[in-house]
Image (cartoon, rainbow, N blue to C red):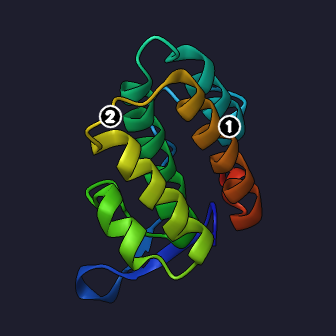
Amino acid sequence: PPGGVGGGRGRGGAPRPTPPPPPGAPAGGLLAAIGEIGSGYRDDPRRGCHELSRLLRDHAGRSRGRDLSTASTWELSRKSGDKRVRTLFGRLADLQFGRRAPLPIDLSRICRRAVEVAKAEGWGRAS
């Protein structure tokens, strides 16, 4: 569970603690951080998409009691059990790595979608 012990067992069967919040996370938690990315990277939307992906991987992992920091956006778009999460990470991967550079409006839209998914998944409660 968020904030508690999760993620199965480590070596020797000892419970693995939930990873701490990412360094530099804003005091307002996940939803505030998404908003900051949406407004703070308007001059470099692709970089903003990379930052958003990192942030969402951290929170998705913590909510599941796992470390997803090394999972790629593509992996999460294919392997997540929830269709909303798969769709979000799939779109985010397109923006991060697509041929066309994302526009500020693309970053704004994906941030709005990220807020919707984070609320639906309960990720904001883990902040």
Would you say 76 lies left or right of 62 here?
left
How crowded pointer 1 is (Cα within 10 Å; few <14, some 14-19, many 20+) is rated as some
Q: Residues within 10 Å of mark 2 (few under 14, many from 20)?
A: few
Q: Disc 1 designates what residue? A: 29
User: Pointer 2: what residue?
Assistant: 100
Q: Is residue 113 left or right of residue 25?
A: right
* Residue at the image position 40 percent from the left and 42 percent from the top: 95
Q: Quadrant of residue 1?
A: bottom right
Q: Residue at x 53, y 72 (%)?
A: 64
Estimate the x, y position of residue 82 in percent, counting from the top left. 58, 78
Count all numbered tags in the image, as a single digit: 2
* Sequence order check, earlier mark of 1 and 2: 1
* Extreme residue toward the front, this view: 100
Q: Position of residue 2 (x, y in %)?
A: 64, 65
Q: Is residue 101 above or below residue 70?
A: above
Relative to 85, 100 lies left or right: left
Q: Position of residue 20 (x, y in %)?
A: 48, 48
In front here: 12 or 111?
A: 111
Q: Residue at x 28, y 58 (%)?
A: 72
Residue 127, labelled with which disc? none
Residue type at mark 1 is Gly
Q: Please, what secondary structure does the residue beneath circle 1 have?
A: helix
Q: Which amino acid is tagged 2?
A: Arg
- The residue that appears at 27% across and 43% down in the rendered structure is 97
Do the residues bearing badges 1 and 2 touch, measured as CB atoms within 8 Å? no
Q: Is residue 127 visible?
A: no
Q: Give percent across and percent down for residue 35.
A: 67, 28
> Which residue is most to the bottom?
13
Mark 1 or mark 2, which is nearer to you? 2
